[in-house]
Amino acid sequence: MGPATLVFWIASLFALGGGLGVVLFKQAIRNVLSLVVVMLSLAVLFLLLSAQFVFAVQVIVYAGAVMVLFLFVITLLGPVREQSTMRLPWQVFISAVVIAGFAGFLVAMLRGVTYRTPDAADPLFGTVQAIGAGLFTDYLFPFELTSILLLVAAVGAIYLSRGPR
Amino acid sequence: MLLDAGTIQVGSEQLEVSWFLLLAAALFVLGAIGVLIRRNPLVMLICIELMLNAVNLTLVAFARQLNNREGQLFALMTMTVAAAEAVVGLAILVDIFRVRDLEDVDDLSELKG
């Protein structure tokens, strides 16, 4: 087993452990910190998949900015009492059935894929040059649309949280 | 192997792409479990973020296997959408919590028909 395989297994163990923490911890702050673990291990996997720019964005934007936002909201709201009892009868059982069916569906879908032949290998694959060239040539219009989306989200967040009126 | 998605070359090693795909599927299912069984709206938002991250892993793995940059570009778009979703969702939550002390998403059922 070489170093790349070892890195993959360690990172995926951390990702799965963090995912379990997100679902199982009772305090919201622990859920958020588990999600940070998941995001950092996914960033390592992105690097393994030679997606350097996506790696950098994942660490800076996701594990940095978005998670800090979640932490701010948690400190703002204080501890939330979560009711341990389920409101719906049989909720865990129904959830288990739905999730088992959904997981089976996902695996069946992945098995049914026929893969086309890969493109020619590009020495710049995943670098900032390749991503930037894609964003500013073929995908310029979607890229500009995301800026409008971010503007709308920022204005909406300020409007929603501007205080009592 | 359960899936036959080919391999990628990392250094001198061959990694199965299906490992990445199965890990992403497992993380997505974990996020779905969280949305279904947790009652705290904040934790449900966190679980949605987990599902979006799992999708990103799938996109980047396919991009690497097919030597195709569109997968990575779309992962970046997903991150933008996820950030916008988190901002608006958290703003709505803060607004709701300011009006009243919420314990459970089921307390927000006045609009139910």
Image (spheres, grey):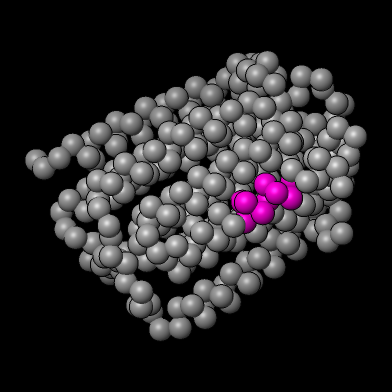
Residue A57: percent from the left, percent from the top?
A: 55, 29
Asked if residue A96 is positioned above or below residue A132 in the image, the reply reads below
Q: Which residues are magenta?
A: A8-16
Is residue B104 a member of the stretch shown in magenta? no
Seen from the viewer's position, the closer of residues B43 and B32 is: B43
Q: Residue most toward the left?
A: A165
Q: Residue most toward the bottom?
A: A89
At x 28% / y 60%, what residue is drawn? A80
Q: Name which quarter of the figure residue A117 lies in.
A: top right
Residue A58: percent from the left, percent from the top?
A: 56, 34
Residue A134: percent from the left, percent from the top?
A: 66, 20
Horizontal side, residue A72 vs residue B11: left or right: left
Q: Name which quarter of the figure residue A105 lies in.
A: bottom right
Q: Looking at the image, can residue A134 be seen?
A: no
At x 86% / y 54%, what residue is drawn? B4
Residue A100: percent from the left, percent from the top?
A: 63, 72
Seen from the viewer's position, the closer of residues B16 and B5 is: B16
Q: Quadrant of the C terminus of chain A?
A: top left
At x 52% / y 81%, what residue is drawn? A93
Asked if residue B32 is positioned above or below residue B19 in the image, the reply reads below
Q: Name which quarter of the figure residue B77 lies in.
A: top right
Horizontal side, residue A144 vs residue B110: left or right: right
Asked if residue A7 is positioned above or below residue A60 in the image, the reply reads below
Magenta stretch: helix, strand or loop mostly: helix
